[in-house]
Amino acid sequence: MMMERKNWLKKIDAYERLMRLDKPIGILLLLWPTLWALWLASAGRPDWRVVWIFVLGTVLMRSAGCVMNDLADRKLDGYVERTQYRPLVTGEVSVKEALALAGLLSLAAFGLVLALNKLTILLALTAFFLAASYPFTKRFFAIPQAYLGIAFGFGVPMAFAAITGTVPTVAWLILGANIFWSLAYDTAYAMVDREDDVKLGIHSSALFFGRFDVIAIMFCYVAMLSLLACVGWSLHLHSPYYLALLIAAGIAFYHYTLIRLRDRQRCFQAFLHNTWIGAVIFAGLVLNFIIYPATY
């Protein structure tokens, strides 16, 4: 009986690591732009039922995406230092189990979306396609991180659709900002795996940008913050929001100090630290609508 319980605990632990629940950074990077969109779409007064649907949906779809990613990369991960002990590589989880888990997580996420309007459901189907197809883009697309930015940011048009029933221009501006942000933080992440990616013939933005990788990352931060400033201008946001963008710019500069020498450990630290950019911008939005209630 004790042995059986121990085996089940090991299996649950393996599933948890397969879904990356032990590494919540991916959930946070996916969640922040969605929260920005929910607050902007509702002028700071979101329906909390919708907020919880998006939060739970984000956790479920990020988990499903990680499982799908590991299924696609299971024959490659064993050759990469950072991924060689993932559950599918070590055999702790079988391919059939992983497929069933990915399906169950996706169905649960889609079940949540069914409580929302038709446009949001249609956008959710697109989001699922993006999440499922992303792992394969690194085989043929020179900058797969740009595709990831679309996949990671698709909660933005979904949030606007759920709150307003439409997807206005500002939603696409925020999605564009998220694409540049994803390029920034995921290029720093790709700098960690550069040598392994070269050996395996896998594409990444770090390889594409080459010796201009640090410059490219900083350009992406500037483009992201510029687009978000355009969002603020078009929606007549106030000083708390722009102060948040200024602090985010300071954090981005700190990331430059981490990545400029291309040390793998410090590049990974910069990647992890990006959650503070998302958090600061969200805090700025919340304060903006508390101090200056909007009527749009």
Image (cartoon, rainbow, N blue to C red):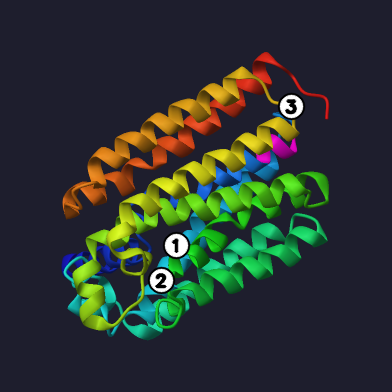
Q: Nearer the viewer, residue 154 or 163?
A: 154
Decide: is 74 above or below 6: below
Residue contact at pointers 3 and 2, CB within 8 angstroms: no
Count neighbours of disc 3 (C-alpha within 10 A) and say few if under 14, some if 14 to 19, many if 20 or more: few
Q: Residue at x 72, y 44 (%)?
A: 170
Q: Residue at x 20, y 47 (%)?
A: 266
Magenta stretch: helix, strand or loop mostly: helix
Amino acid carrying label 3: it is: His
Residue furthest top in the image: 291
Amino acid carrying label 2: it is: Val
Count neighbours of disc 1 (C-alpha within 10 A) and say few if under 14, some if 14 to 19, many if 20 or more: many
The magenta-colored residue range is: 38-42
Residue 5 position, x and y percent, is 23, 65
Residue contact at pointers 2 and 1, CB within 8 angstroms: yes
Task: Measure how far apart labels 3 and 2 are at the Cα level.
Answer: 41 Å
Residue 222 image label: none
Q: Nearer the viewer, mark 3 or mark 2?
A: 3
Residue 199 position, x and y percent, is 20, 80
Q: Is residue 7 left or right of residue 56?
A: left
The residue labelled by disc 2 is 67
Q: Does 179 lie within the magenta span?
A: no
Q: Is residue 97 left or right of residue 93?
A: right
Q: Nearer the viewer, residue 222 or 237?
A: 222
Residue 74 position, x and y percent, is 30, 81
Decide: is 11 above or below 218: below
Q: Does 40 lie within the magenta span?
A: yes
* SS at mark 3 in the image: loop
The residue labelled by disc 1 is 63
Is residue 62 visible to us here? yes
* SS at mark 2 in the image: helix
